[in-house]
Image (tube, rainbow, N blue to C red):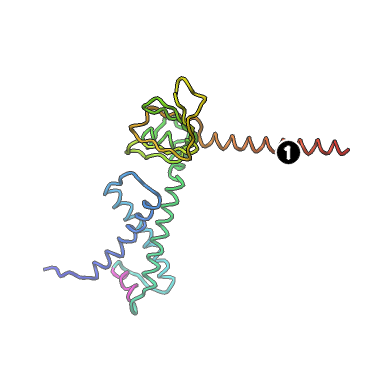
Amino acid sequence: MVVFDPEYLLLALILIVPGFIAAFIGVTLGVVEQRISNAKWVIVSLVSSLIVLSGFLGIAQSFGDSVTSPEAVVYVFFTPEFQITRILILLALSVTLGLIYAVVLSRNFHVWVRGLIWTGTDRKRNPWQPWEGAMQDAHLVQVITRDDELVAGELAEYSRAGRDRQLVLRDVAWFKDNQDNPQNPESKAVKEMFFDGEIKQVSILMTEDGAEKMAAESDQGEGDDNGGSEAVECRDEE
């Protein structure tokens, strides 16, 4: 008969829980909306636990603790008595790794790495559905509704792959009739939300890169105008 040993349960918690904490923080703060399979959860959590535990054991050994076997990990927390600081260090490492995951996801570093790997190939692959892939770098968007009304505005939010199409535009301009009255906007709101059933067609009028380029050219033009004005003033003074 196998006798249950609480020591092994505690060892399992120490080895596994930190990775789950890091993965959960990363997915939550990084706003991962796609469903993650159980297999991926387990793999990411176990790898994260390995990273956290490696860092923790390195810190523990710098404090003079000796770990010569997996079972000896438990004694790091209870020698010569319960060490609350060791628990706090382990949790801090888990949270830190989770924050790193969140930053990587929110800043799309993984997308940059994927693009770097595929640079120079003649294939075009998108890990998202076309909807999300098109909206990722969109700045100015034009929407034709089911009622054939046209609205244009800056993209504020969009739904992710695998969900109903939804858009939120800011600084929008509505047009009464898409065909007959394209120059007379009916109203202008701060933000407008469009649901899947309302969207007939979406056009990307300007990307983020295009908007940044236009802003840079505008700033450069203003600088040239100011420089020209100063030159004229100097000539007038002479």
44 versus 229 height, above or below: below
How far from the left and from the top, in percent, is residue 19?
34, 58
Residue under pointer 1: 226
Name which residue type carries label 1: Asn
Quadrant for residue 169, please give it.
Answer: top left
Q: Residue at x 41, y 64 (%)?
A: 92
Residue furthest toward the bottom?
80
* Kind of element beneath mark 1: helix
Closer to the camera in the image, 217 or 48 = 217
Query: Dot 1: within a 10 Å radius of its alpha carbon, few (fewer than 14), some, or many (20 or more) residues?
Result: few
Query: Looking at the figure, which quarter contains the C terminus?
Result: top right
Main secondary structure type of the part rendered in magenta: helix
Q: Residue at x 37, y 55 (%)?
A: 25
Picture mark count: 1
Q: Residue at x 37, y 30 (%)?
A: 199
Q: Residue at x 45, y 51 (%)?
A: 103
Residue furthest toward the top?
180
Indicate yes or no whether the magenta region holds residue 73.
yes
How far from the left and from the top, in percent, is residue 68?
33, 69
Query: Looking at the figure, which quarter contains the N terminus?
Result: bottom left
Q: Please indicate, yes or no, whether residue 152 appears anywhere in the rendered image.
A: no
Residue furthest toward the front?
186
In the image, is 130 to the left or to the right of 238? Answer: left
Indicate yes or no whether the magenta region holds residue 20.
no
Quadrant for residue 85, please give it.
Answer: bottom left
The part of the chain drawn in magenta is: 71-78
Closer to the camera in the image, 232 or 32 = 232
How far from the left and from the top, in percent, is residue 89?
40, 67
In the image, is 43 to the left or to the right of 106? Answer: left
How far from the left and from the top, in percent, is residue 96?
42, 59
